[in-house]
Image (cartoon, rainbow, N blue to C red):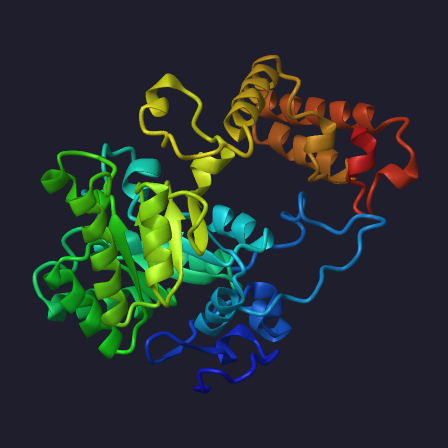
Amino acid sequence: MQRAALAPISHQPAHAHARIAGGTIIRPLRQSFRHLPPSWRLLSHAPEAAVYGGGGGARPGHQEAAPPARPVTLATLRGKHRRGEPITMVTAYDYSSAVHVDSAGIDLILVGDSAAMVAHGHDNTLPISLDLMLEHCRAVVRGAPRPLIVGDLPFGSYESSPAQAVESAVRLVKQGGVDVVKMEGGAPSRVSAAKAIVEAGIAVMGHVGLTPQAISALGGFRAQGKTVDSALKVVEAALALQDAGCFAVVLECVPAPVAAAATTALQIPTIGIGAGPLCSGQVLVYHDLLGMFQSPAHSKVTPKFCKQFANVGAVISKALTEYREEVEARSFPDAIYTPYKMSSADADAFANVLQRMGFDGPAAAAAAAADNYSEKLAGRKPQEMNTNGVLTARAAV
């Protein structure tokens, strides 16, 4: 199914939507199990409600979730750019972070090759492969049905020729499920590759300024555009990528005057990262803006331009320490977090069978566990249990 570039977005399921990305692209299937027919789910590997649902079940007083928001398309971004509305983008690499970014209403998710550093512990972005990028892309797509998903072409996947660039971009869209791709650099060969990808029907986001894949030539992670010649090269490269058909350009680690000049010169949006406030939009890495990494070992790769909007790393460390302490003290799990119950009759029968088989120790252990569970439940009010006799969340308060 295809639709015209400016056609209104319907409220059909996600697989019915198409997106325009330098041509017409069929929007990848993005349905969760809950949207599938009950008859299909009976044959699937969807989690059983009897086992899962401890954290996401409905609670008294909670309202039903709002209908899903309309997916972000290139037309959405063009409209925001035309109206002067800032565009938001976050770099994320997995399902859980994609769910958070989606729920926050962010416009775009970049599945960046910076996963090499953030998710895999490398010193730079160069080691990550296209195959591994595809895995990250698929995970993000499953978690974020609304934002426009941008897949990063990793180092080594597009430099040889425009044909190689097109082949890699097609794989990101067909196998990774992304909507558009991003590539670094504004040299003539990169501009030719971008043009070839666009002509193949896939939208391209450019990237100039500091291009991490070129650290060998740049001499490391160094800001760009600090001299007149360097600043002019940034603007000229951005214009060349626009002429090649790119729908937006990332400006990384350049002075604010350079970003302002490029943003004014271009007719497409600029997305800044360490480029000041005068770009059309901004992007930060999920882990950086949340303060996920707190140890001294990670501080050396925390960008100077990144504001930490939370200190999630400290919260995570505290929670993991408390978990370790409770396990070591044998205070976790208690009866509240041991929800799967045998009836008294079955527990007794089980212990008797074990004893007849000569397993006296296991029989005694099973009987003691059953008695201990019953003692923990003694005195609980009926409303503190669900229909299976399992303690509810209220019992823990």
**In the image as oriented, which residue stretches furthest toward the left?**
160
Looking at the image, which is closer to me, 116 or 371? 116
Residue 112 in view, yes or no? no
- Decide if residue 64 is on the left or right side of residue 312: right
Q: How many numbered discs, if any?
A: 0
Please provide percent x and percent y for residue 314: 53, 23
The vertical placement of 46 against 395, above or below, is below
Residue 257: percent from left, percent from top: 35, 45
Instruction: State whether residue 158 appears in this view.
Output: yes
Q: Split into 4 quadrants, where in the image is the C terminus?
A: top right
The answer to which quarter of the image holds residue 247 is bottom left
Q: Residue at x 49, y 76 (%)?
A: 15
Q: Is residue 17 above or below residue 153?
A: below
Q: Residue at x 68, y 67 (%)?
A: 67
| Front-most of residues 72 and 376 | 72
Nearer the observer, 30 or 271: 271
Which residue is outermost to the top?
Answer: 329
> In the rendered image of this protein, does residue 200 appear above or below residue 234?
below
Q: Compared with residue 361, is residue 89 higher up or lower down, i.e. above or below?
A: below
Residue 316 pos. (x, y %): 53, 27
- Find residue 4 and report its image quarter: bottom left
Nearer to the camera, 212 or 177: 212
- Which residue occupies 69% across, 40% down? 340
In the visual, does 212 lie left or right of 288?
Answer: left
Residue 244 lies left or right of residue 365; in this view the side is left
Left or right of residue 196: residue 99: right
Residue occupying the point 42% across, 48% down: 283
Q: Specify the quadrant that holds the N terminus.
A: bottom left
Question: Residue 349's spot in the image, x, y percent?
Answer: 71, 37
